[in-house]
């Protein structure tokens, strides 16, 4: 009977183990309560890692997320932005295209965007015991890094700022033309703009150079 039980339906121990492994894929900042979407994405990343056909298993072993959010993209539907702690971002960056592809299979009809968590230090940084504010922690530098994160695996080849008569600014982001037909990048341009606006409150237009 014991053997039959082991071979049949998954045991409670197995289910608990899977849940624990899923939890390892999600570390919220300051003990915040995970949302349902956070847990779904953490489970999806764990499932991708343990899939027999996974070719990014080794890289995913130490990767975990800090959260996920849905972002509305006008008529184009929804995009999902997945946040990763900065300490694991170097690994995520290497597999960014493949991980996005796998997550988009699991979250049907959603564009997936991956970004690293970065901390902006304001001008009161000396109160935090720092003598010099690293350039990488300024508002401008963090927003530039977010741009580079969210368009991955393609790259930015140019930027222009257009200032309207009312003083509002629109950032025009030119992407590498060699990636135009890869990974449905062109269909994701509205999603990039929506996510950038959500994360920075700034307007940006993403495009490929016109020939």
Image (cartoon, rainbow, N blue to C red):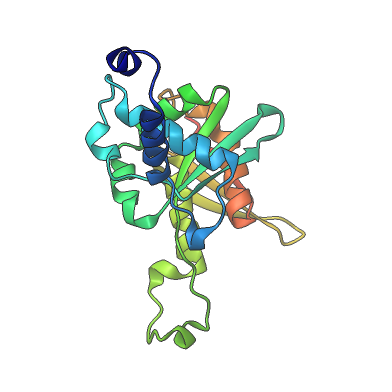
Q: Residue 164, how many percent across, how many down?
A: 71, 55
Tell whether 205 sits left or right of 8. Answer: right
Q: Residue 198, how many percent across, how many down?
A: 63, 50
Tell me which residue sits at (33%, 44%) in the image. 63
Residue 77, above or below 33 = above
Residue 4, above or below 193 = above
Asked whether 164 or 63 is in front, the reply is: 63
Tell me which residue sits at (51%, 28%) in the image. 186
Tell me which residue sits at (41%, 29%) in the image. 12
Q: Name which quarter of the figure residue 93 lies in.
A: top left
Asked whether 62 or 79 is in front, the reply is: 62
Residue 188, above or below 31 = above
Tell me which residue sits at (50%, 63%) in the image. 30
Mark yes or no: residue 140 visible: yes
Say which quadrant the N terminus sits in.
top left
Q: Name which quarter of the figure residue 193 lies in.
A: top right
Q: Name which quarter of the figure residue 126 lies in.
A: bottom left
Asked whether 48 or 193 is in front, the reply is: 48
Q: Residue 46, how many percent across, how many down?
A: 37, 34
Q: Residue 75, how many percent across, how many down?
A: 71, 28
Mark yes or no: residue 154 visible: no
Asked whether 91 or 195 is in front, the reply is: 91
Residue found farthest to the front: 1
Q: Number of labelled discs?
A: 0
Tell whether 197 sits left or right of 60. Answer: right
Residue found farthest to the left: 58
Residue 39, above or below 9 = below
């Amino acid at each position: 009977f014991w053997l039959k039980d082991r071979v049949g339906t998954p045991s409670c121990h197995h289910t608990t183990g899977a849940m624990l492994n899923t939890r390892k894929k999600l570390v919220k900042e300051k003990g915040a309560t995970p949302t349902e979407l956070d847990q779904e994405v953490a489970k999806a990343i764990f499932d991708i890692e343990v899939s027999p056909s996974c070719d990014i298993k080794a890289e995913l072993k130490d990767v975990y997320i800090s959260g996920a959010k849905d972002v509305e993209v006008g008529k184009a539907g929804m995009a999902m932005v997945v946040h990763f702690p900065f300490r694991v971002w170097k690994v995520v960056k290497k597999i960014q295209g493949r991980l996005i592809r796998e997550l988009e299979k699991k979250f049907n009809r959603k564009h997936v965007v991956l970004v690293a968590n970065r901390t902006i230090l304001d001008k009161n940084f000396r109160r935090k015991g720092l003598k010099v504010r690293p350039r990488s922690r300024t508002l401008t530098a963090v927003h530039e890094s977010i741009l580079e994160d969210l368009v991955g695996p393609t790259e930015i080849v140019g930027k222009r700022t257009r200032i309207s008569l009312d003083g509002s600014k629109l950032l025009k982001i030119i992407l590498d033309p060699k990636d135009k037909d890869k990974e449905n990048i062109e269909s994701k341009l509205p999603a990039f703009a929506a996510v950038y606006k959500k994360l920075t409150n700034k307007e940006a237009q993403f495009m490929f150079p016109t020939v």
